[in-house]
Image (cartoon, helix red, strand yellow):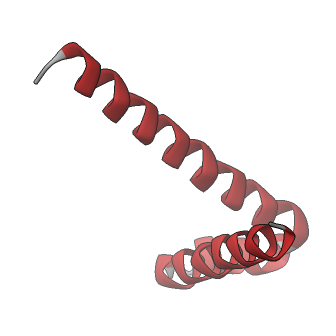
Amino acid sequence: MSGKVALQLNAIVGVASTVAASAIMWLVLTRPADVAVTVASHDYEALVVAIGHQLGAWVHALLRFV
């Protein structure tokens, strides 16, 4: 793997983790009770689904803007 490919992969992973962290923080700030219940019951699938829906809404809003 060349240095250029490694840097590109590092950038992709960095952007993906930043977006995921932003989605989690958005859910914590907008729906704290739902997140607390999900984490307390160890039902992380519901949290992942909510994050997916939030990311989908962000992409949809971005595409409507463009």
Asked which quadrant contains residue 37, the reply is bottom right
Point out residue 61 in the picture as x, y percentages from the top left corner: 81, 74
Q: Quadrant of residue 12?
A: top left
Q: Quadrant of the N terminus?
A: top left
Residue 23 against residue 21 in the figure, above or below = below
Percent x, y of residue 4: 27, 19
On screen, residue 6 versus residue 12, left or right, reads: left
Q: Quadrant of the C terminus?
A: bottom right
Q: Residue furthest left?
A: 1
Picture layout, residue 12 above or below residue 34: above
On screen, residue 8 versus residue 45, left or right, reads: left
Image spot of residue 49 (x, y percent): 55, 83
One can see residue 61 in this view: yes
Q: Is residue 16 above or below residue 1?
A: below
Residue at the spot 62% in from the left edge and 51% down from the top edge: 19
Q: Position of residue 57 (x, y in %)?
A: 74, 78
Q: Which residue is painted at 68% across and 59% down in the image?
A: 24
Which residue is painted at 86% across and 69% down in the image?
A: 65
Q: Is residue 3 above or below residue 31?
A: above
What residue lies at 71% left-to-right and 73% top-to-bottom?
35
